[in-house]
Amino acid sequence: MRKMTIIVLVTLLAVTLIGASAYAWKGGGFGGYSGNCPIYGAVEPEKAQKFYNDTLPLRQKQLQLKGELMQLYAQPNPDWNAISQKRQEMAKLMTEFQKKAQEYGLGYGFGRMQGFRNCPRCW
């Protein structure tokens, strides 16, 4: 019994240490750099907010397409042609995101909807 207790305590300690180090490594904010990229510098919050406001319809369309795609996959006999078409629509939508991000000077991280990750070192 004593041996089992020691094993459980050591396991919990290991899990706690691994979790704490992973949490500490991530850092704060988007991409682990709080919006500050070591190469490109900080992202202007006003520019980011305007980008998010202007791309709201695109994000809503993306959520709609994801839902439709999940429904297509969930069918007993999925229609692979319809799935292919939805995936093509999603690819076009992502291209639109990337174009908008470039227009705002936010790099490719915003186009992929991944926060402030507009820096090769931050992805």
Image (cartoon, rainbow, N blue to C red):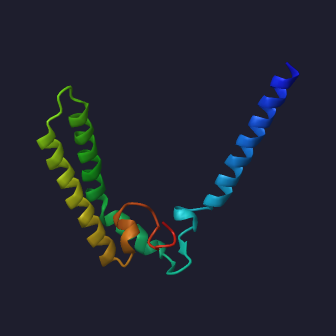
Residue 96 left/right relative to 32: left
The image quadrant that residue 64 belongs to is top left
Q: Which residue lies furthest to the bottom in this view?
A: 40
Residue 6, quarter of the rendered image: top right
Please identify the quadrant where the N terminus is shown.
top right
- In percent of width and height, residue 23 lies at 65, 53
Return the residue found at the far top. 1
- Lateral position of residue 122 relative to residue 87, left or right: right
For image coordinates 57% across by 67% down, the residue present is 34
Q: Residue furthest front?
A: 3
Q: Tell me which residue sits at (30%, 63%) in the image.
A: 55
Rendering coords of residue 81 (x, y %): 11, 43
60 vs 92, nearest the viewer: 92
Residue 68 appears left or right of 53: left
Would you place residue 72 above or below residue 45 in this image? above
What residue sits 27% from the left and 61% below the top?
94
Q: Residue 41: percent from the left, percent from the top?
A: 53, 80
Task: Pinpoint residue 26: horizontal percent, then vertical percent.
Answer: 61, 59
Q: From the viewer's perspective, is 116 left or right of 95?
A: right
Q: Nearer the viewer, residue 9 or 50?
A: 9
Corner quadrant of residue 25:
bottom right
Q: Residue furthest right?
A: 2
Q: In this view, does 107 lie above or below 23?
A: below
Q: Which residue is drawn at 30% across and 69% down?
A: 98
Q: How many labels does the image show?
A: 0
Please say if 17 is above or below 27. Answer: above
